[in-house]
Image (cartoon, grey):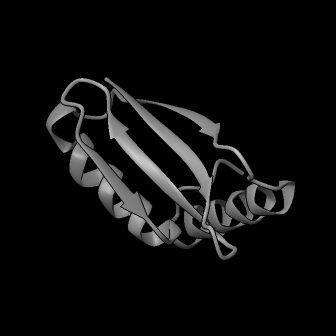
Amino acid sequence: MKFKSVVKAKPLGGWYIELTDEQTGMSVVCDTIEEYMTKIEEMGAQYGPDIEVEWSQGEGVIPAYINEIRGLMREYQEKMGLSEG
């Protein structure tokens, strides 16, 4: 099952992630990595462990936002014992 995760810029600064289930078309907005991870777990539960996430970015997303999200994802994975290292 495929999900789309699009990093978007907020009008007044900052970022959010729009998560979409491509099969159902259901879409949610996540303002934090914790919220994103909870939502993808909830939305993906019906499909089992075999899900694919396609990442992209919207207009106006600066490299600093992408770097921040990568760092937060890494921290979250380490905290939850999910890191590959």
Please indicate, yes or no, whether residue 72 appears anywhere in the rendered image. yes
Q: Is residue 32 left or right of residue 23?
A: right
Quarter holding residue 1? top left
Q: In this figure, what is the number of numbered marks?
A: 0
Q: Compare residues 80 and 12 and report the one nearer the observer.
A: 12
Residue at (63, 68) in percent of width and height: 11
Spot occupied by residue 72 in the image (x, y as percentages of width and height): 66, 68
Most extreme residue toward the front, as rendered?
11
Q: Compare residues 52 and 77 and report the one nearer the observer.
A: 52
Residue at (82, 56) in percent of width and height: 62
Residue at (18, 29) in percent of width and height: 24
Most extreme residue toward the right, as rendered?
63
Q: Is residue 24 left or right of residue 30?
A: left
Instruction: Decide: is 49 above or below 66.
Output: above
Spot occupied by residue 74 in the image (x, y as percentages of width and height): 67, 61
Instruction: Decide: is 15 above or below 12.
Output: above
Instruction: Decide: is 15 above or below 53.
Output: below
Q: Is residue 26 left or right of residue 9?
A: left
Quarter holding residue 4? top left
Most extreme residue toward the left, as rendered?
46
Residue at (42, 63) in percent of width and height: 30
Spot occupied by residue 73 in the image (x, y as percentages of width and height): 62, 60
Please indicate, yes or no, whether residue 80 appears anywhere in the rendered image. no
